[in-house]
Amino acid sequence: MTKRDDSPAARTATATLLQHHPYRPPAGFESAQLPSYRASTVLFENVAQMRARRWRDQSGYTYGLHGTPATFALERRLCDIEGARHAVLCPSGLSAIALVDMALLRSADEVLIPSNAYAPGREFAQHMLQAWGIVARIYDPLRPESVRALMGPRTRLMWLEAPGSVSMEMPDLRALVALAREHGVTTAIDNTWSAGLALKPFELGIDVSMQALTKYQSGGADVLMGAALTCDDALHDALLDAHMRLGLGVGGDDVSLMLRGLGSLPLRYAAHDAAARQIAAWLQRRPEVAQVLHPALPGSPGHEFWLRDFRGAAGLFSLRLHADFGPRRIDAFVDALRLFGIGYSWGGPMSLAVPYEMQAMHAAADGDAAPPSAANLVRLNIGLEHPQDLIDDLEQALRAARPG
Ligand SMILES: *Cc1c(COP(=O)(O)O)cnc(C)c1O
């Protein structure tokens, strides 16, 4: 042992050393999954490399907001699911909707939104976009020909959603896309229900696909994230510019959770689908139930378009109870459920139930026409419990809430 210690540790204060302790991923070590990259700062080798920085095409790293190896990997995997060329990640599904709107619309432009669209996305258009001089027009998704009358020279963007949120009507996507194309209008679909598995929007000629990854891609009901995907380089550039200017970053640990969820996505989606169809078919035979709104069930609005365009269905559907179930009995039904949690969102492992009075919601919010199937609804998210246990639970809750 020498008397004088010349090691860096001896010459450098501990506080400094702790910031500059060398870390390199060890050679010869590779984990099966990507590590969690937590980064605001990204280090460059030297100033020349910093000056030559590139990030737009995922060929380099510049700053945490503009991508890490993990965000790029997640974007690539999402592209592979849907057959997209490009993707950008956002902190939530709703922020991905807002990103698409802000990237593609300018003052005096007009945007078309289906009446059964995810309500917070519609409200973003009706409140924020309208305040910026952008006009939001609400259309009936079950009457594509009626949309023609709403189109003008300033119509820039048509939102699609399949099926509609909560009321679950399946639109004729091909007819709506044809109409948009005829008028040179860009199309964007909220494709969350299909998780990108059951519907391939780019095969139908849709320009942008938006996903709330919060739902099935995560699968855990424990992380929020969204994405906007496209095959069009110019549209991706516009999305990327807006994404950069708005600073829509996602957390490194959230990206890890999302990558972890993706591995089991097809298996989970198939399980949710099978269980939901079994339960929906059982509900269809119940005397308390007026209508089951599940696109894969004959008799559900737009079922023929689901048959034509989809290769599967989500575990999310709604039922309409008979009129003698007023709002009070509907609440009693939901309260009586033991295995269904009462809560928003869906796609997670636990079943959930939410009562909706959509006519009232629409009238109070904006005086718009409500979606076609709006009254006395309960939306069910079918989780990963045993389907027979869920059926037994629904049966006892229907009994408990039944009038008379
Ligand atoms: C949940 C949801 C969103 C929004 O996703 P968040 O991550 O909760 O913001 C958008 N569209 C649909 C159809 C949804 O169900």
Image (cartoon, rainbow, N blue to C red):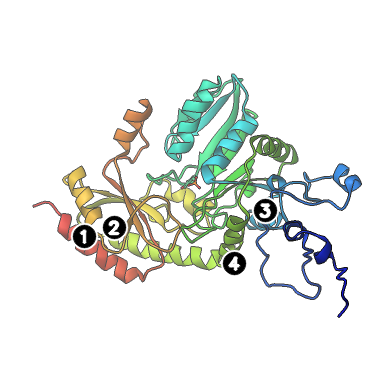
**Within-10-Å neighbours for mark 3: few <14, some 14–19, many 20+:** many
Q: Give the number of the mark in front: 2 or 1.
A: 1
Query: Looking at the image, is mark 1 or mark 4 earlier in the sequence?
Result: 4
Query: Looking at the image, is mark 2 or mark 3 earlier in the sequence?
Result: 3
Disc 4 marks which residue?
A: 263
Q: Which of the 4 image quadrants contains residue 364?
A: top left
Gap between marks 2 and 3 measured at Cα: 39 Å
Disc 3 marks which residue?
A: 75
Q: Give the number of the mark in front: 2 or 4.
A: 4
Picture layout, residue 37 above or below residue 244: below
Q: Amino acid at mark 4?
A: Gly
Check if mark 2's residue and mark 4's residue have beta carbons within 8 Å: no
Q: Nearer the viewer, residue 142 or 102?
A: 102
Residue 349 visible, this orientation: yes
Gap between marks 2 and 1 measured at Cα: 16 Å
Q: Position of residue 127 (x, y in %)?
A: 47, 26
On screen, residue 235 versus residue 265, left or right, reads right
Gap between marks 1 and 4 measured at Cα: 35 Å
Q: Give the number of the mark in front: 1 or 3.
A: 3
Q: Amino acid at mark 2?
A: Gln
Gap between marks 1 and 3 measured at Cα: 42 Å
Disc 1 marks which residue?
A: 397
**Within-10-Å neighbours for mark 1: few <14, some 14–19, many 20+:** some
Residue 137 visible, this orientation: no
Query: Looking at the image, is mark 2 or mark 1 earlier in the sequence?
Result: 2
**Within-10-Å neighbours for mark 2: few <14, some 14–19, many 20+:** some
Disc 2 marks which residue?
A: 284
